[in-house]
Image: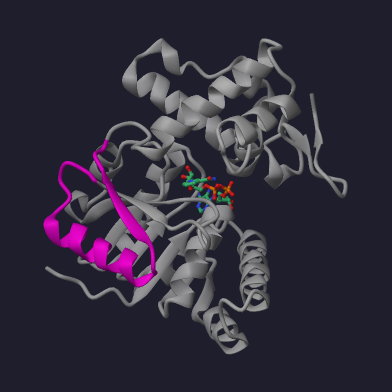
Amino acid sequence: MVVEIKKIGVIGSGQMGSGIAHVCAVAGYDVALSDISMDRIESGLANINGNLARQVQKGQISEEARSQALARISPAVDLDMLSEADLVIESAVENEQVKRKIFSQLCPLLKPEAILATNTSSISITRLAASTDRPERFIGIHFMNPVPIMELVELVRGIATEDETFEASKDFVAKIGKTIAVAEDFPAFMVNRILLPMINEAIYTLYEGVGSVESIDTAMKLGANHPMGPLQLADFIGLDTCLSIMQVLYEGLADSKYRPCPLLVKYVEAGWLGRKTQRGFYDYRGDTPVPTR
Ligand SMILES: NC(=O)c1ccc[n+]([C@@H]2O[C@H](COP(=O)([O-])OP(=O)(O)OC[C@H]3O[C@@H](n4cnc5c(N)ncnc54)[C@H](O)[C@@H]3O)[C@@H](O)[C@H]2O)c1
């Protein structure tokens, strides 16, 4: 059954969920944005508003497009408000139990033909799909951060994902102006399978005292021509997300080369999760970021 995607539900209004809602609304889709509280949804909407305003300033979209996009996003305090959606994209925290719980509450509310997608960075699509009532209509649509800026979307089929689901998802990604890379369903897919071990190695380099935060980031920016250093990037992704991806790689591939650096664990235990909590490998509370080690 080929579904025409018109209405979209987004679960989780954090940095990724709000970005997904933003690009969908700009592309003309009606979006219902959900999270655990109205406060969280409002903070997601404020984030979208700020990012849309920046796009207007840069001349990328008109003021009219900004207000129209905002008007297309409705806060969904109850999951019930996602029942009309043709596609729901789950983008809540990177925790399998949380995601499974969301799916068990959501699925009975959805139309039978609705497609359910997850923006997980690393968890098995096949395993998540198996916990739902619609493994054939389940798919990984993995956006990159920040969503309005990054062009790539990894599309990941689970073992049971039907061709119609895959094709409808491909059309959707094209309509929001992104480019697809198809990945097989193995831990962390492609981008994070390659990127996160590099970030983890940068943290080991810091942990072992080979370099300071600044020298490691400078080394990779100027020595490998990366637009931002690996520790700066880790703060940007969120250190909790980095740690969960490393744990998924470590457990999923059963290879000790993926062991998360103890220093990464310590930062997460401290609640220093990077930009989103104003402190990670850098302290963002002042005018310019200051290294924390
Ligand atoms: N940060 C990245 O660079 C990145 C990139 C690609 C994909 N992802 C994936 O996107 C997802 C979200 O990551 P993020 O960076 O936006 O995290 P985040 O911490 O910014 O946001 C997560 C949001 O999920 C909400 N949430 C928690 N439990 C919930 C529930 N039961 N129901 C609804 N909402 C709930 C939280 O309140 C929060 O607003 C994760 O699966 C992550 O792996 C992250």
Identify the residue shown where x is 30% and y is 57%.
Answer: 116
Along the horizontal axis of the image, is 116 left or right of 63?
A: left
Q: Which residue appears farthest toward the bottom when viewing the image?
A: 64
Residue 22 image offset from top left, x and y in percent: 52, 69
Colour basis: one colour
Q: The N terminus appears in which quarter of the rendering?
A: bottom left
Along the horizontal axis of the image, is 126 left or right of 41?
A: left
Q: Quadrant of residue 223?
A: top right
Q: Is residue 247 above or below residue 164?
A: above
Identify the residue shown where x is 49% and y is 56%.
Answer: 150
Is residue 163 inside the magenta stretch?
yes
Along the horizontal axis of the image, is 235 left or right of 12?
A: right
Q: Is residue 151 above or below residue 249?
A: below
Residue bounds of the magenta highlight: 157-185
Identify the residue shown where x is 61% and y is 68%.
Answer: 48
Residue 195 image offset from top left, x and y in percent: 47, 33
The tally of labels here is 0
Q: Quadrant of residue 257?
A: top left
Q: Is residue 77 above or below residue 260?
A: below
Q: The C terminus appears in which quarter of the rendering?
A: top right
Residue 67 image offset from top left, x and y in percent: 59, 85
Residue 239 image offset from top left, x and y in percent: 61, 34
Q: Is residue 100 above or below residue 261?
A: below
Along the horizontal axis of the image, is 268 left or right of 164?
A: right
In terms of depth relative to the viewer, which is nearer, 229 or 30? 229
Is residue 275 inside the magenta stretch?
no
Identify the residue shown where x is 40% and y is 25%.
Answer: 249
